[in-house]
Amino acid sequence: MDFEFTPEQKSLREEVRAFLEEERRRGSFIPKCDSWQWSISREFSRKLGERGYIGMTFPREYGGGGKGFVDRLIVTEELLKYGAPVAGHWIADRQIGASLLAYGSEEQRREFLPRIAKGEIFFCAGMSEPEAGSDLASLKTRAVDKGDHFVINGQKIWTTIAHEADYIYLIARTDPEAPKHRGLSEFIIDMKTPGITIRPIYDMRGGHHFNEVFFDEVKVPKDMLVGEKNRGWYQITPQLDYERSGIERLMSNYILFDAIKGYMREKGIYRDKYLLTKLSELLIEFEVGKLLVYRCALMLDSGKVPNYESSCAKVFCTSFEQRLSNFAMDILGLKGALRKGELIFEWASDDYLSSPNYTIQGGTSEILRNIVAMRGLGLPSK
C-alpha cells in the first residue's frame, strides 16, 4: 500500500500552512481547542471561501472545488492543527453540502451550495431531541402538510451553533401513523422564520455552543422539503457517516497535545519513564486514528460512503481525545485545573471539562460499537 501523498497534495498542505502562519501572525485568530465547535469568525470563513478551502468536494458547477475528500482532509487537518476559527461553516461544509448533492433539488443546490462554498452562510443540524438522542427515529417534532407549506412544532436540543446559524437542516415527523423510521422528512429552514426560539445551553466550562431550539407554528415553504417526503431517515443516516468520519474527532485538541510535548521538554519531564511511556502510547494512537480517518476519505473518493468504518474511526478517535485530556491534567496538575497563567493551562482545563462530550455527541460509542458489530462483523442484532 502506498501511503505517499501526491505532489499536488503536498503542495496544497504547504499552501494552507503558509496561509495559516500569515493569518496567525496578523492576529486574525487566537488558537483554541475544539475550534470546529467553539470558534466562529464570519470574516475568517469568508477568507477560507475565497481561497477555495470550503466546499472543496462540491462540483464546480455549484461553486465548489471539484476536488477529492483526501484534499479536503488535508485542509481540515491543518486548520485544526492551528486551532483556527472554523465552527461557523464546519457543519455545512462537512455534511449539509453532501446531503444536498445526494437528495436536494436542483434549485436547492444552486441556492445554497455556492453560498456555503463562499463561507457566506452557516448551518446547524436539527436532529436530537430531549427524548430522541441515540434513538433518533423516536423524535416527536411534527411537520404538518398544509398544501403549499408545512407547519412545524416541536423542540431540538444540543443544537451546535444554532445561535449563529443562518439555516437549520431539520428532520421532523411527517407521518405519525407510519413506523417510526418511515415517517420522517428533512427540511431547510431560515433561522429568522417567525416562531423559532433559541435558548443557550451552558456546559461545565461555562461555554455556549449548544442550544435548545423551539418551533411554534413555524411555516416552511414546500420547496424547502429536502428529497422525498417520509424518506428522511434513509437520507439522514449517510449524513451521519460524514459527521462521524472527520479528523475533528481526533484533532479537537491538537494544539494542547503539541503544547504538552513542549511543556514536558521544557520541564524535563521526559526523564520520567512512566510519563514518557504514556506519551509514546498517545503518539502511536494518534497515528492510528489518522489512518482510520484517511481510510474513510479514501473510501469517499472511490465513491463509497463509509458506514461501520466511520463508526470505527469515531469510537477510536474520541476515546483517544479523552485519554489525551486525562494525560494533560496529570502533567499540569493543579495549574491545569485552575486555568492560571499560560494558554496551555486554559486549554487543558477546557479540554478536560469538555471531554465527556466526545464519546456522546455525534453518536454514542455504545451505539457505534453496535454498528461495527452488525454491519462490520456481521453479528446478529439480538
Image: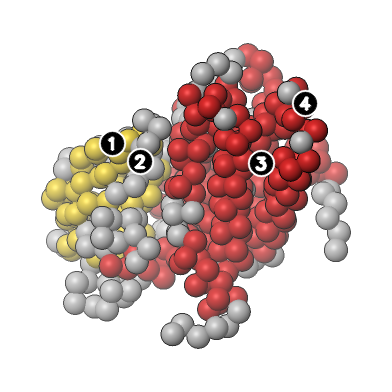
**Mark sitting earlier along the chain (2/4):** 2
Q: Which residue position is annotated with label 1?
A: 200
Q: Which of marks 1 and 3 is nearer the N terminus?
A: 3
Q: Which colour scheme is used?
A: secondary structure
Query: Label 3 crowding class (10 Å Cα cut-off): few <14, some 14-19, many 20+?
Result: many
Counting residues from the start of the chain, the first of labels 4 and 1 encountered is 1
| Disc 2 target residue | 210
Q: In which quarter of the image is residue 21?
A: top right
Q: Is residue 29 visible?
A: no
Q: Do the residues labelled 2 and 1 touch (CB within 8 Å)?
A: yes
> SS of the residue at dot 1?
strand
Q: Which of marks 2 and 1 is nearer the N terminus?
A: 1
Q: What amino acid is labelled 3 in the image? A: Glu
Instruction: Identify the amino acid type marked 1.
Output: Pro
Q: In percent of the image, x 34 and y 66: which residue is there?
A: 135
Side (left or right) of 292 relative to 157: right
Q: Give the number of the disc on residue 268.
A: 4
Tell me which residue sits at (59%, 47%) in the image. Answer: 323
Mark 1 near mark 3, Cβ–Cβ under 8 Å? no
- Nearer to us: label 1 or label 3: 1
For label 4, the crowd category at 10 Å Cα-Cα, with few meaning under 14, some 14 to 19 and many 20 or more, is few
Q: Can residue 201 be seen in this view?
A: yes
